[in-house]
Image (cartoon, rainbow, N blue to C red):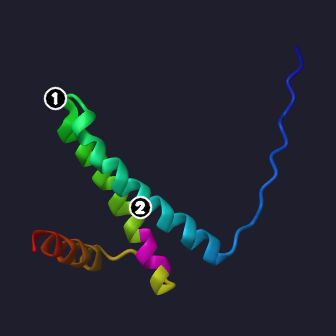
Amino acid sequence: MTNQKQQVEYTAITFEELKEWVDENVEFALLVQEFYKCVPMDSREQFQGLTQSVYDCLESFSEMLNNKTLIYSRELEQARLNAFEQKEQK
């Protein structure tokens, strides 16, 4: 048996393509959250926590791309999450 390394070709993407890809995955993360009802009761809380974390990460990254800055601020993130929760409650 020979041990051969596979060649992987990488393709650069534009900022707009990256932003579109992240935004599509934000929407996908929201859709996945709706499947919690299909998860056994004893695992639902973990599933919801996991899917919410993925959504929050993608949404934060999307906001950074919107602002054209890749700086994470816990205070700004918490303010964004609080505003989102208040909008959800209305």
* Residue 79 rendering spot, x and y as whole percentages: 21, 78
| Residue, disc 1 | 42
Crowd class of label 2 (few under 14; some 14 to 19; many from 20; radius 10 Å) = few
SS at mark 2?
helix
* Residue 21 rendering spot, x and y as whole percentages: 56, 64
For the question of whether residue 71 can be seen, the reply is: no
- Residue at point 20%, 37% (across, down): 44
- Residue at point 38%, 67% (across, down): 59
Q: Residue placed farthest to the top in the image?
A: 1
- Residue 63 colored in magenta in the image: yes
Crowd class of label 1 (few under 14; some 14 to 19; many from 20; radius 10 Å) = few
**Which mark is nearer the camera, 2 or 1?**
2
Amino acid on which the number 1 mark rests in the picture: Asp
Q: Quadrant of the N terminus?
A: top right
| Residue, disc 2 | 27
Q: Nearer the viewer, residue 16 or 4?
A: 16
Q: Is residue 89 above or below residue 53?
A: below
- Residue at point 39%, 54% (across, down): 29
Amino acid on which the number 2 mark rests in the picture: Glu
> Which region shows up in magenta?
61-65
